[in-house]
Each structure stands twice: as C-alpha cells, then as structure tokens.
C-alpha cells in the first residue's frame, strides 16, 4: 500500500451489497510457513488511482472530436453495445444506422484480429485479407483500444501503406500517446516530426500527451523543453498543459517551479478550476505547507469552485499526514454534508488515522463498515497488513494477508513488502525468505522498496549479515549489483561518483521517495561499515541529482537550512559533514561565509521525529566532538543553530573538510 493515498481511485463497478465478514479471526491458525501455496486463482484487482493528476481524462475531453462530420458517430439514434465500448449510431434513418453498424463492425473486426496475434508478416497478411476497409476515424478507435505499443505501431505503419488511407491529426496524436506511455521516446519524437511533414499539424492535445509522457518517466527537462516548443510553434498551453507540468514538478520535489507555473497560468488568463485547485492543494501539501493548502482549499470554495470527492480526499489525507485528527473528522463530515459518499480512499485514510493513533480494532470496524458498500480490494487489505505489522503484531498482519487470499485477491508488491518488513523487524528470516519466494512464484518483481528493507535490516542486524545478503541476492534487483560492485574510492573519488551517477540515471523513472529511501539505506550501511569516504561521495551525487530536495537550501541571504530530520543516523552525519565541508570550500573560493546555519533534526513538539531521536543524538555528538558553536531554539530542541563570528571562525578550520572520516 505504501500509505500513498494520493494515488488511489475507486475501481469502477466494485460497489456491492452488504455481506457478512468475520475478518482474519475466522482463519485457521498456523505458522507463517503456511503462506506458501496459499495463493489461489482469483480476479486480480488493479491499484486504483483517482487522485493522481495525470490529466488522462482531461486530455480525452479536450481531444473529443466533433463527430458530426462524414466519419463521425453523432445524433441520438440507437446504441450498439460491444466489447469495445458503446458507440452511438447516427440519427436520420435506416441508411445512417446501417452505415454506423458496419463501421462499428469494422472497428471490432480489426481490433479482435490484432488482439489475437503478435505483429508480424502473418498479421499483415490477415489484415490484407479483411474485406472491410476503415478510415482515419475508425483507425483511431482501434488504436485507442490497443495496449501493446508494438502492435499499435505496426498497425499504424501498415495503415499508411493502404491505398486511399491517410492518417489525420487524431491518429497521430493517439499513436504518440501510446508510444509515450510505453516510454518509446525516440520513436515518439520521430513520429512528431513525421506528423509535420505529412501536413498534420500537432495540436495542444498532441503536445500535452508528450509532456505527460516525459513527466511520468521523470524526465522534467524534456517536458519543459516540449512546453517551450509549444510556445515557439505558436500554440497556447491550456489548463491541462499547466496542470500536468505543475503535478510532475511537485512530485519531483520542485515545489517552487510548480508554484511559479500556477502563477503563470493565471497570468495568461486561465482561471483555476476544480482540477487545478486539487493539483495545487496536493502540491502545497506535499511541500509541507499545510496552512497554505487549507487556505487555497477555502479560497476554492469562496470562488464558487465546488470541491469534488478527489479534493476532499486530498485534504483529508494531508490533515491525516499532519496528525490533525480533528480536522480529518471535520472534513470527513463536511464531505458527507456536501453530498459525497465516502469511497474506498476515504475509508482507507480514516483507517490509517485510527491505526496510527493505536486504535486498530476501530480501524477493523471501519473495514467492516466499508464492506457494506464496497468490495475491499488488495490495497485495503494491504493497509491492514501494514498497520498491524508496524504495530508489531505479526500474527495479525499475517491473518489479514491470508484473509486477502481467501477473498480471492492476489497480493501486490507493497503488501508483500509490509509483511516482509514485519518479519524482518523481529528477525524471522525464514519467514522473510518464504515471503520473497512467494513473491517470485506469483510473478511479482521485488521493488526498490523491497531491497531497501533488506539493506536496512542488514545494517541493524550485522550479526545476521550473511542471511540478509542472501535475501538481497534473491531479489535480483539492480540495486544489489550497484552495492556489490561499488569500487573503493580512488583519490578524488571520481570512480565512485561515476558508479553512483550511472545507477541513479538507470533508476531515473523510480519515484523520488523510493530513490531517497534506498540512498539513505546505502549511505547509512556504508557509514556504519566504516566506508565513510564512499558514503560521503554517494551523498554528494544523490544531492546533486535532487534525491534529497530541500535538504540544503538558502532561506534568505546568507541564512542556510540543513534539514536532516527524515534521514537515518549514518546518512544524517554524512550529509551534515559533507555540507559543512562545502561551506568551508566556498569560504576559501568565494571569501564569503554564511551568517547563520540551522541544522534541523526534528520539527518540534508535534514532529514524528522527536527531539530525543537517534538522529538528534548522533548529530549533537558530532557537533560537540568538533566544538561547533551552536545553541538550540526554544520551540524546537531538535534544531541546532550556529551564527555570527563564531560560526565564521569555525568554518575556517581545515579539519572541516575531512570531518566525516573522523
């Protein structure tokens, strides 16, 4: 589950009547080894993603074509239901209805032919033998139904060779979207160039598809470059363009850029709508600016823009993350007063809030309440596995895992990770081994988070390092090769920098939180294993590649913030040492020193990372060891402050450059 509620959407058609459910208590007791072979055939429910601002629905809305032309389906005539969807027939008599029926049959015939075969000469031969020919509009309908980009591209190229057929802007745009989703960026760009040569001018929708494709893969520079190309070509970006760019920058940690884009959107006369407000509220919330997010939410209502269920779920999730439980309850009630029924996302957030408050029995009661209207899917079960696992009750976590299997659901990787983490915390390595083997047997690919869990356990249980290394090897994840072949640092450390840079480039499409978690575990492991030089070099490369956004930033002129509160002990000490060394070098090169440095190890009294955390203890020990001139603020004992002439004098010491080794 990963507690990532902002990415969840109710699955269509999953509401069902009230059913009796007795929870994991009805499961026969047994050892964790009984997990093996527990899986049974059943419907595999996909993750739901209602709050991810991927603009797909909006793009389809913008791209919706005027279908009143000769190739369109319009009017209010009969509807023909088919596996490919519901297409309205023309009004205006039996001739028109007959033409529409034939058109629909042609789309179905081509689609089913392509679905049953892989692309190749035989597929082309079968298509050549079909008696019904299709036009660009019908071809576009077929392309929209294809999921395999190789089949779609083969079909697209085959169509170009058919006598009398000519692709239009819609078929090009659909094909570009398919290639972008498959991350075939080279072919996608070539097709865009070909589109212009074929006298099919790209539209705003075309550019939006490309921007979204680059954004999904975390290629922000390329996305911005396409945005600039739009301007140069004379196209005016629409709300979808701006919202897509806002969302991908916010997710990557570039919150200032996201806010700037929001301002630019309003400057060009595009007023925010519900979709835009939701994206911005989510952006501000992820940046920790909860007060600003709530203010924008209120502004949205004042401006007559009605929040939808997605907006409410975002706000509830943000307040839950900030531990503002009273606000969670208030928003939950406001949502119902506004006429919105809770969906699985809402229920899940409330369950998580109760779980983190220690009220896990109440969380299970909410599950039963939810079951009256919704069929729980895998992420909901995964949440309960995660909550009980984090609470230290492995038997309960295992019980919910088995309940999910008994309900005919297949586990996903995050749920397996939750169970794996629960076993690792209490050093039940044999059970952890069984979980990993079952993942592989079910065709699940261990994720970056899976490997990170194992590496963190390896750091904490050094006596069991051999077992942990064996489990890490079983995952087959590229991260294991990265760590296994990490070279010893040469003078200057460029070989380690290159090794790390290559790995992070390879992991480019992984989300920032996953990469941060892995780098944190790697640096912590190396630091505690005595490889401090390598740990420092890896930190520097990770910081340069924005894996740790806002960990070091200038709050105002000569006033710097070093934020360590989300790091492990070894990573925090390494990051602090290397950052202070950077200030030392800047003084020698530029001749200017910071007037104040705040070193944050916790966010005060309400922080989940308290003032007595291990990170704070390790940082304070380091600062005391090197006699760093610091004091603590009244409101936050986890914040160490150095300023003025004492700070300047201390940063001039030559040992600051190598303090991470001492």
Image (cartoon, grey):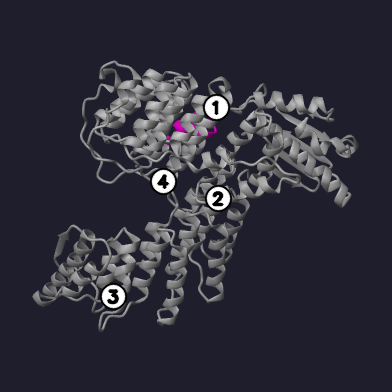
- Of badges 2 and 1, nearer the viewer stands 1
Residue at 37%, 33% in the rendered image = 347
Circle 4 SS class: helix
Q: Main secondary structure of the magenta part?
A: helix
Residue position for label 1: 458
Q: Nearer the viewer, residue 445 or 165?
A: 445
Circle 1 SS class: helix
Residue position for label 4: 310
Indicate which disc, 2 or 1, sits on the residue closer to the N terminus. Answer: 2
Residue position for label 2: 250
Residue position for label 3: 159
Indicate which disc, 3 or 4, sits on the residue closer to the N terminus. Answer: 3
Q: Is residue 401 left or right of residue 501?
A: left
Q: For the residues labelled 2 and 1, say whether their Cβ atoms are less than 8 Å apart.
A: no
- Of badges 1 and 4, nearer the viewer stands 1
The crowd level at tag 2 (other Cα within 10 Å; few <14, some 14-19, many 20+) is: many
Indicate which disc, 2 or 3, sits on the residue closer to the N terminus. Answer: 3
Q: CA separation, marks 1 and 4?
A: 40 Å
In the figure, 274 relative to 201: above or below? above
Circle 2 SS class: helix
Please tell me in which quadrant of the rendered image residue 488 appears. Answer: top right
Q: CA separation, marks 2 and 1?
A: 33 Å
Q: Is residue 273 visible?
A: yes
- Of badges 3 and 1, nearer the viewer stands 1
Q: Which residues are magenta?
A: 321-332
Is residue 324 a member of the stretch shown in magenta? yes
């Amino acid at each position: 589950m990963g507690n990532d509620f902002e990415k969840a959407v109710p699955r269509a058609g999953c509401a069902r009547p009230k059913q009796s459910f007795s929870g994991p208590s009805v499961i026969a007791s047994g050892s964790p080894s009984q997990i093996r072979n527990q899986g049974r055939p059943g419907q595999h429910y996909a993750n739901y993603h209602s709050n991810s601002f991927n603009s797909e629905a909006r793009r389809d809305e913008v791209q919706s074509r005027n279908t009143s032309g000769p190739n369109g389906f319009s009017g209010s005539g009969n509807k023909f239901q088919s596996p490919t969807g519901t297409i309205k027939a023309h009004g205006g008599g039996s001739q028109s209805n007959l033409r529409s029926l034939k058109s629909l049959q042609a789309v179905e015939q081509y689609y089913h032919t392509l679905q049953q075969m892989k692309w190749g000469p035989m597929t082309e031969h079968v298509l050549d033998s079909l008696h019904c020919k299709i036009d660009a509009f019908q071809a576009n309908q077929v392309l929209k139904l294809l999921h395999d980009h190789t089949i779609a591209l083969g079909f697209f190229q085959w169509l170009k060779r058919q006598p009398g057929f000519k692709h239009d802007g819609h078929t090009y745009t659909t094909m570009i979207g398919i290639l972008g989703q498959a991350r075939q960026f080279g072919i996608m760009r070539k097709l865009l160039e070909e589109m212009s040569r074929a006298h099919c001018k790209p539209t705003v929708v075309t550019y939006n598809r490309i921007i979204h494709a680059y954004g999904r893969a975390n290629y922000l520079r390329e996305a911005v470059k396409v945005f600039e190309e739009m301007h140069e070509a004379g196209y005016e970006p629409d709300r979808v363009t701006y919202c897509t760019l806002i969302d991908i920058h916010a997710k990557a940690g570039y919150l200032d850029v996201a806010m700037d884009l929001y301002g630019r959107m309003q400057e060009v006369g595009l007023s925010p709508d519900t979709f835009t407000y939701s994206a911005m509220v989510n952006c501000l919330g992820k940046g920790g600016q909860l007060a600003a997010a709530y203010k924008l939410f209120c502004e949205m209502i004042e401006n007559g823009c009605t929040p939808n269920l997605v907006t409410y779920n975002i706000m509830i999730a943000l307040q839950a993350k900030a531990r503002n439980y009273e606000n969670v309850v208030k928003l939950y009630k406001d949502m119902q007063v506004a006429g919105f029924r809770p969906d699985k996302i809402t229920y899940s957030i409330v369950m998580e809030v109760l779980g983190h408050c220690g009220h896990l029995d109440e969380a299970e009661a909410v599950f039963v309440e939810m079951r009256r209207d919704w069929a729980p899917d895998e992420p909901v079960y995964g949440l309960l596995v995660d909550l009980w696992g984090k609470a230290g009750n492995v038997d309960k976590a295992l019980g919910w895992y088995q309940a999910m299997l008994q309900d005919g659901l297949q586990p996903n990787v995050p749920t397996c990770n939750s169970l794996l983490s629960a076993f690792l915390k209490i050093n039940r390595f044999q059970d952890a081994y069984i979980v990993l083997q079952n993942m592989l047997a079910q065709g699940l690919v261990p994720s970056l988070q899976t490997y990170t869990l194992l590496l963190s356990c390896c750091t904490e249980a050094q006596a069991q390092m051999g077992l942990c290394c064996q489990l890490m090897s079983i995952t087959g994840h590229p991260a294991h090769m990265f760590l296994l072949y990490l070279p010893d640092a040469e003078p200057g450390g460029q070989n380690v920098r290159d090794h790390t840079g290559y790995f992070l480039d390879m992991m480019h499409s992984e989300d920032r939180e996953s990469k941060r978690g892995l780098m944190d575990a790697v640096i912590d492991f190396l630091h505690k294993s005595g490889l401090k030089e390598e740990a420092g070099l890896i930190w520097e490369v990770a910081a340069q590649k924005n894996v740790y956004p806002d960990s070091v930033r200038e709050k105002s002129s000569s006033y710097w913030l070093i934020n360590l509160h989300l790091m492990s002990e070894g990573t925090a000490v390494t990051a602090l040492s290397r950052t202070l060394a950077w200030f030392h070098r800047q003084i020698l090169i530029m001749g200017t020193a910071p007037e104040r440095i705040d070193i944050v190890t916790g966010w005060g009294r309400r922080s989940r990372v308290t003032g007595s955390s291990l990170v704070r203890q390790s940082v304070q020990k380091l600062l005391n060891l090197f006699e760093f001139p610091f004091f603590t603020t009244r409101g936050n004992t986890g914040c160490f402050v150095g300023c003025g002439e004492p700070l300047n004098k201390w940063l001039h010491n030559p040992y600051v450059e190598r303090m991470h080794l001492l």
